[in-house]
Image (cartoon, rainbow, N blue to C red):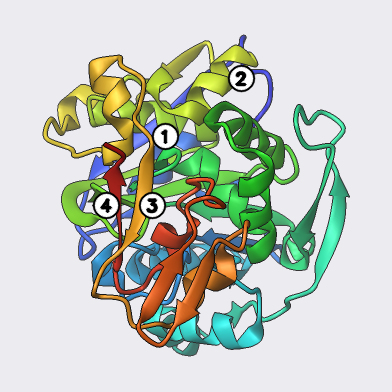
Amino acid sequence: MLQSNKQNIVKVCIQKSTYQTIDLDSLLHPMGGITNYVSKGERVLLKVNLLNATQPEKAVVTNPTLVKKTAELVIKAGGIPYIADSPSGQFTKGRLKRVYKKSGLQKISNELGIELNYDTKTTKIQIPSGKKLKETPVCSFIKKADKIIALPKIKTHSFMIMTLATKHMFGIVPGLTKAKYHSLFLRRASFADILLDINFIAPPDLIIMDGIIGMQGEGPSGGIPVDLGIILASENAIAIDIAVCNILNIEPVGIPVLKQAKIRGLWPKEIHYPQLTPQEVRYNDFILPSTANYILTGKKTPKTNPIVTNKCTSCGLCQEICPKHAITNTSTGAQINYLKCIRCYCCHEICPEKAIELEDLK
């Protein structure tokens, strides 16, 4: 839940786990178990991270094993789970079909008989308490949920440094609108504020975070899988993100969305860890994206250009997603017009071949 939390004491449950040993009953026990969040007959949105059509072992998408375990728990409680997200790029049934298949979620849907969302309609939502956004289009699948369980993944992000629980709900915004917001809100602080505004629309009832295999380096799609061996749960996105920062030895206010959340009075007064503490599962060698050097040095981050390498297959996804139409797809690869480029790194984010690298301007 995202609200003014100054008087709140929030629980964050942390356990060591592999994908083979996930025990959600044990993880959620200090929070009252799944029946504290799901009642019989309720439709439960499992909001996953489906950035693009990628195999689970690349650590780009929420691992299907965690999704399956969560769906089974919802079914056990009498709920009716369905899986949804808006990947990058055009929000179409064809793209959803490719993403579901490659991510392993189509197989889970077949095994458990649960729904995969193919509704690509959108609706406009007012945000009375929004700071930067007072309204936004959102995917209609969000309106069909009685309850929401968010299933984010621990990943780096070249623009926002980390993509965790608070950024996760940006996925309810249809794909190309996300790119549009990159062009409208160029500063990290402004973009962080719209992420917080969007969380007011549909704050998850429960968050279960995939930190078993995370992503470090040049995320959210071009980074390196890293074995963190943890799983986390909370009702509060900001609290769970602060916990992750403490685990990875990152100063939380170095993450733009957490810094803006603190400024807006959204941090909880206290975080209680009824199981393991961040110190007990500390990971000291986590690699941040190159755009996060300012966190370590305190110096202003140099401007970074996206550079197309010879891995480019001319698939056209980068041209499609670029909010400033700065990319032209040719038979020999993508070409970037740096006079138009706003360094939002959407092209780097969506590239399935990791063909776009980030290089500091000299």
* Marked residue nearer the N-terminal end (2 or 4): 4
Q: Is residue 35 visible?
A: no
| Residue labelled with disc 3 | 153
Question: Answer yes or no: do the residues labelled 3 and 4 have beta carbons within 8 Å?
Answer: yes
Give x and y (percent) for residue 248: 23, 31
Q: Of circles 3 and 4, which is in front? A: 4
> What is the CA distance from the residue labelled 1 to the residue labelled 3?
22 Å
Q: Which residue is mark 2?
A: 266
Residue at (37% x, 35% y) in the render: 13
Residue 110 is left or right of residue 117, and the answer is left
Q: Find out whether the residues at labels 1 and 4 contact each other: C-beta distance under 8 Å.
A: no
User: Which mark, by number, is residue 30?
Assistant: 1
Q: Tell me the distance, in whole angstroms, between the alpha carbons under discs 3 and 4.
A: 8 Å
Question: Of marks 3 and 4, which one's residue comes earlier in the chain?
Answer: 3
Q: Position of residue 29 (x, y in %)?
A: 41, 41
Question: Amino acid under label 4?
Answer: Met
Q: Is residue 297 above or below residue 78?
A: above
Report the side of 282 relative to 288 (left or right).
left
Q: Are marks 2 and 4 in contact (CB under 8 Å)?
A: no
Going 75% across and 31% down the picture, which residue do you hit? 132
Q: Which label is found at residue 215?
A: 4
**Identity of the amino acid at label 1?**
Pro
Inter-mark Cα distance, 1 to 4: 28 Å
Are discs 1 and 3 less than 8 Å apart at CB? no
Circle 2: residue type: Leu
Left or right: 106 as drawn, with respect to 47: left
Find residue 345 and name its label: none
Quick one: label 3, few (<14), some, or many (20+) residues within 10 Å?
A: many
